[in-house]
Amino acid sequence: MKKILLLLALALLPAAGALRINEIMYNPVLDDNYFEWVELYANESFDFTNATISDSAYTDEIMCCNANCSLKRAGYILIIDKDSKTNFSDALCVDDNSIGNGLGNSGDSVTIKKRGITIDSIRYNGSSANGNNRSLEFFNGSWLESIAMGGTPGFLNSIANISAGLVNISFNETANITINQTNSTMINGTNQTSNTTNKTSNCDVSLEIFTEKIIYSDEAIKFRHILNNASYSFSIEYWIEDLFGGIVKAKRNTTNTEEKSYTANIDESDKTLLIKSDVSANCSDTNLSNNYAEKMVVVKGEKKQAPESSQTQTQETKTQTSAAAPAVSKFDYEIISYPEEIVSGEEFAVNVKIIGDSKQHSLILRSYVYKGSKHYSEETTKEFVLKANGEEITELKNVVEAPPGYYKLKVKIKKDELVTEYDLTEDIQVVDEKINTVKENMNNVKETKDIVNEINENYTINLTEPKILYSSKSNNAKNLVKYLIIGILVVISAVLIWKR
């Protein structure tokens, strides 16, 4: 019977040597920009150098997200966005803050390519796993809604587990399905059945903590432990701390991976907690660095009002207190100006505004234009020191060499010695220089027409009554002689009349 189950489980896995899309969380309960993910499966090591992932709108380069990352992978491989808050410890990511243009909730496509050659491509229509905290799982040539809440990122799909008879299923009062891998565990496509071993056996047992979500409000925090190898007897010690190391849930030991829960009782508006666990197995573990795991969650609570006595203080006292308290500033950044259209080969400027917090920081800003995995401009870099509570507007200049089309402008900000950079992304369009010149000429023609119309409207010439603007000296002399002769004649006539 075990052999039959093993053969069935192996049949559900991808063909040897294949890399394919295996599971998709396209509309998570939480923010789409931070909690979307795509799971791939590779039966053998696959090199993601020059590999890309696309939706129907945009293409992103697949890259490493952490210092210990390797682009060569086998097994279950998660692709997340660069600013993901999923806390997957060993995931690859895309080069900006969304997979493609953000996986569409009403339907989209997902395509994996390497050096432009399509490795796998799928399309979904949004009819299943849409905002209900479930994922789309690949099973037997079809895409189905996951049975496990939150899907099974990094592990055998829940539908494949049930079909192979490798799990027990139980229903709770809210009709959610809990999956307990009690009979056996799938490890890289191999069925590891439970058996009794001694400490002399070599092993490598690793531990992870899985929660259905990151943010909780007026509800119990539910979590479960995931082991890569449950064939040895084991013991897991787990507890919960706050950010200052204070114990909020005392240490306990468990010998199973069933779901645990904890209800926090806090009197603050928000509180961050760390679930911590450590596993020890009945074998000679060759790698103890992965026996420890922790998961961060946020509990939202209602902030209690201050005691009535404190509310009775006078307005004058409140004003004095507010004036004495230092202003609390937050490190913030934004692109305040950039051209939406640029001409290939011409320099353009981007202005970035940075507002500092209560500490002084060393900043490195860089900008470039890209599309998919290819850069179309050299990186421009500027370094400076931002004083405490300071404000700085920095100009970055780039030159793009690219054919006409739509591209992305990226600005990255490195603060002090932090590994993770802040980034800003805007859409820009590269236009043809000839088209741009024609637009300028058309604008000039329009301006000329406007000037002519203005002249016609405000200035008229009266042709029936010409106005003398200038008269020559000779013409003036002629007029003077004429008047002189008339004067003489008048005088002579007066004399003749007098003599009579």
Image (cartoon, rainbow, N blue to C red):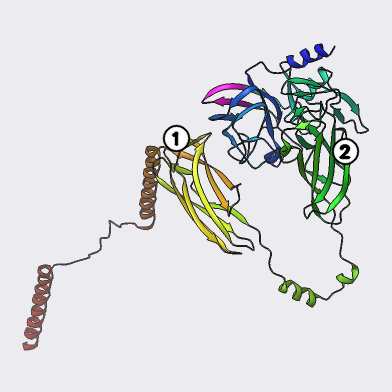
Is 220 drawn above or below residue 282 in the view shown?
Answer: below
Which mark is drawn over residue 404?
A: 1
Indicate the secondary structure of the residue bearing disc 2.
strand
Q: Amino acid at mark 2?
A: Lys
Q: In the rendering, at what x and y percent does residue 355 appear? A: 59, 59
Q: Tell me if mark 2 has few (under 14), some (14-19) or many (20+) residues whose alpha carbon lies within 10 angstroms of its own.
A: few
Name the residue tied to disc 2. Answer: 260
For the residues labelled 2 and 1, the Cα–Cα distance comes to: 56 Å
Residue in the image at 36% along x and 45% along y? 445
Is 405 drawn above or below residue 18 in the view shown?
Answer: below
Q: Amino acid at mark 1?
A: Pro
Which mark is drawn over residue 342?
A: none
Using the image as rendered, state which of residue 234 and residue 52 is in the foreground. Answer: 234
Q: In the rendering, at what x and y percent does residue 190 appear? A: 74, 20
Magenta stretch in the rendered image: 110-120
Among numbered discs 2 and 1, the one appearing first in the sequence:
2
Quadrant the C terminus occupies: bottom left
Residue projecting furthest to the bottom? 499
